[in-house]
Image (cartoon, rainbow, N blue to C red):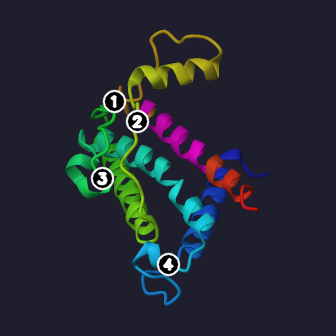
């Protein structure tokens, strides 16, 4: 019998491969580097641009967690002058976890670059990545306040829990956006 974790991992791989397959390559003759002159329909451009909100969230969370700094230092051109995240900070991670989270961060920066080859994008929105906001979300999940409050930056286990939450929210957004198409 398949476990929930296996099914979730399989779904993520399937969706990731689907997104990669659906994104045009940089060498595709059907797409121009100039998004304004692209043959991609406007509604499709909007569907590609919307996930940038999630990419900002993931990139900033993972970059700050691993490095203690975000897009403003790592890839300022991607932030496009948007406000720095609220409450994001370096997580107290063991060496192996830090290395894994750093790879997640670089992957998110890669997602940005791929999407921005197709769409104009927008400045980074204001993001609240504070421990207090995560604590509120976890309290809601448990139906009561935890004592001590959940802090994603406290240790590797907490950061992995938060790392699971953020892409999961995004995954449900990606799946739901499929049904928005007319």
Q: Find the distance from the CA under tag 3 to the CA under tag 4.
A: 22 Å
Kindly indicate the quadrant of the structure image that contains residue 36. Answer: bottom left
Residue identified by numbered label 3: 80
Image position, residue 8 (x, y; %): 66, 51
Residue 66 position (above or below residue 45)? above
Tell me which segment is drawn in magenta: 158-171
Q: Find the distance from the CA under tag 2 to the CA under tag 3.
A: 14 Å
Residue identified by numbered label 4: 38
Image position, residue 9 (x, y; %): 62, 54
Q: Find the distance from the CA under tag 4 to the CA under tag 1.
A: 35 Å
Residue drawn at 52 percent across, 19 percent down: 136
Q: Is residue 167 left or right of residue 1?
A: left
Nearer the observer: mark 2 or 3; the answer is 3
Which one is in front, 113 or 107? 113
Q: Earlier in the sequence, mark 1 or mark 3?
A: 3
Residue identified by numbered label 2: 127
* Residue 19 visible here: yes
Q: Earlier in the sequence, mark 3 or mark 4?
A: 4
Residue identified by numbered label 1: 86
Residue drawn at 47 percent across, 80 percent down: 25
Image position, residue 6 (x, y; %): 66, 52
């Amino acid at each position: 019998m398949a476990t929930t974790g296996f099914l979730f991992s399989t779904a993520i791989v399937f969706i990731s491969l689907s997104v990669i397959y659906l994104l045009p390559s940089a060498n595709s003759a059907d797409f121009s580097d100039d998004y304004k002159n692209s043959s991609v329909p406007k509604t499709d451009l909007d569907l590609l641009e919307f996930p940038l909100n999630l990419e900002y969230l993931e990139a900033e969370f993972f970059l700050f967690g691993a490095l203690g700094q975000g897009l403003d230092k790592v890839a300022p051109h991607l932030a496009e002058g948007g406000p720095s995240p609220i409450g994001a900070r370096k997580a107290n991670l063991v060496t192996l976890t830090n290395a894994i989270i750093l790879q997640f961060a670089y992957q998110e920066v890669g997602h940005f670059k791929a999407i921005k080859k197709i769409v104009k994008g927008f400045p980074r929105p204001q993001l609240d990545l504070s421990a207090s906001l995560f604590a509120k979300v976890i309290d809601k999940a448990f139906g009561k306040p935890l004592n001590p409050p959940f802090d994603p930056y406290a240790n590797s286990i907490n950061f992995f829990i938060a790392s699971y939450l953020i892409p999961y929210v995004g995954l449900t957004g990606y799946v739901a956006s499929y049904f928005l198409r007319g």
